[in-house]
């Protein structure tokens, strides 16, 4: 099954994350099927750049969102931002 989840990037104590579609059996930082956006929690407000069309396409194919990605997608939709 394909999951849409975060992978950690950045250096020690300076994380940022990429949103990606990946087989759930792969490790957290494994090779993704597709990159779908970025999330940087260190800036104020948090920088969030998502490809909503790509996420919806993967969900249409049966992909499952992780809890964190689901909350980020809801935040983008609630704010009305076109990320």
Image (tube, rainbow, N blue to C red):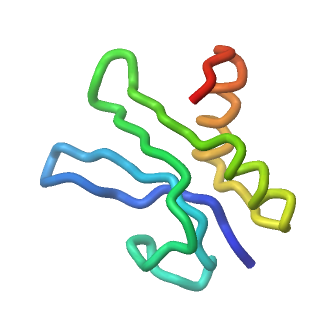
User: Which residue is farthest bottom?
Assistant: 25
Compared across the picture, whether 46 is left or right of 13 comes to: right
On the rendered structure, is 15 left or right of 38?
left
Name which residue lies at 64% across and 14% down.
Answer: 79
51 sits left or right of 45 in the view: right
The spot of residue 3 in percent (x, y) is 66, 67
Q: Residue at position x 66%, y 36% from top?
A: 73
Task: State the quadrant of the C terminus.
Answer: top right
Residue 15's x, y, as percent?
Answer: 26, 46
Residue in view at x 46 percent, y 31 percent? 48
Question: Total number of numbered labels?
Answer: 0
List x then y, in percent, for residue 19: 51, 53
In the image, is residue 29 above or below residue 40?
A: below
The x, y position of residue 35, in whole percent, is: 50, 59
* 61 to 77, vertically: above or below: below
Left or right: residue 64 compared with residue 60: left
Residue at x 62%, y 77% (from the top left corner): 24
- Quadrant for the N terminus in the image: bottom right
Residue 29 picture quarter: bottom left
């Amino acid at each position: 099954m394909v999951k849409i989840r975060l992978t950690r990037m950045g250096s020690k104590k300076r994380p940022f994350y990429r949103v990606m579609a990946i087989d759930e059996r792969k490790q957290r930082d494994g090779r993704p099927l597709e990159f779908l956006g970025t999330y940087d929690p260190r800036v104020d407000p948090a920088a969030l750049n998502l490809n909503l069309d790509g996420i919806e396409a993967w969900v249409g194919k049966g992909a499952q969102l992780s809890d964190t990605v689901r909350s980020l997608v809801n935040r983008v939709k609630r704010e009305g931002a076109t990320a």
